[in-house]
Every structure is written in structure tokens, then in C-alpha cells.
Image (tube, rainbow, N blue to C red):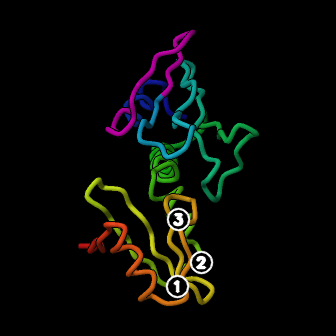
Amino acid sequence: MLTFEEKLTIIQSFPELERKDVSLGRINFHYEESATDKKNVVYHLHPNGNGFVYAEYINGYHPDNKGLVNIRDFSAGELKEIIEQSIKSLSPKTTIEAAVSEDAEEEERWVNESNHTLLLIFEDEMWNVYAGLNSDGTFTTYSEARSYLMEEGFSLQLVR
């Protein structure tokens, strides 16, 4: 079992996490860029080595009813892996875009001057436009969808 200090060193190696000291010497680590209301990646890391990682959206773990997995007996590799996966599961692209494009046959990202993003996704023989998880329109042809997006001031974002 890793010591509190070893766990703390591993957790602090993730620059996207922000430390928040809480009561009884426990520490939480927040992911402020989370696309959900959940910000805690590491919850109540305790000087005795106990603590939890948010894993509700991660396959291969059995979280409790709050979405947390106890990391008391995790190795260094296991701890790094679950934290990486937790951050990824909470990132905006993962939670929003993956949810709407899960069954997509084709997908494009369109952006306007204000940096708002819409996804154009071909699914079930239709072209659907999404703003986050919300449907913004459905079109029978790519040409109709493309015209709509251009009229609304969006342009196709090329992936590099």
C-alpha cells in the first residue's frame, strides 16, 4: 500500500487538478474543467492512506452510490490510471460529444466567431446538428445541413 505522501505526490503530478484542503487533514482534488457538476476527482484523501477517486463513467471499476472507488490499496500504476481515466471521463469532449456521437457514422465539428461549437453527425440516415447534448436540427441531406450551419455563421473546423 502506498503511503499518504506517495499518493499525494502522484495526485499532485496532474496539473489539471486543484488541491482543496478539507477537515481532519483530508484533501480533495478538483478538476475545474469538468463538463459535469462533479468536480472532485480525488475525494477525502486522508493521512491514513484512505481516499476515493470518482469513477462513475469508467469501465472496469465498481463505484459506490456516489460514483467513488476506494483507493486505499491501489499501487502507483493503478492510482495513476484511475486518475487519468477519471479526468478523461469528466472532460467536456468525453462527456458531451461522446454521448451524442456514440453511434455516429460520420461527424464534423463546426465553430462560429464566438467559438461556439456545433456537431454535425450522420446517424440513422439523417444529418443531425447538436449543441452539446441538445439537438439543434435534423436534415435529410448533408447539403441542407451544411447550408443551415453556414447561414448561422458556422464554419467547418478542420482537425489537425
Disc 1 residue crowd, few under 14, some 14–19, many 20+, Cα 10 Å: few
Name the residue located 57 percent from the left edge and 38 percent from the top edge. Answer: 37
Residue displayed at 61% across by 46% down: 55
Quarter of the image where the N terminus is located:
top right
Q: Name the residue under label 2.
A: 103
Q: Which corner quadrant holds the C terminus? A: bottom left
Q: Mark 3 points at which residue?
A: 98
Q: Position of residue 49 (x, y in %)?
A: 55, 25
Return the disc, 3 or 1, that comes first in the chain's sequence. 3
Residue located beneath label 1 in the image: 105
Label 1 amino acid? Glu
Q: Where is residue 91 in the image (x, y as percent from the top left)?
A: 45, 50
Which range of residues does the magenta coloring cover?
12-28
Answer with the quarter of the image where residue 126 lies.
Answer: bottom right
Q: What element carries label 3?
A: helix
Among numbered discs 2 and 3, the one appearing first in the sequence: 3
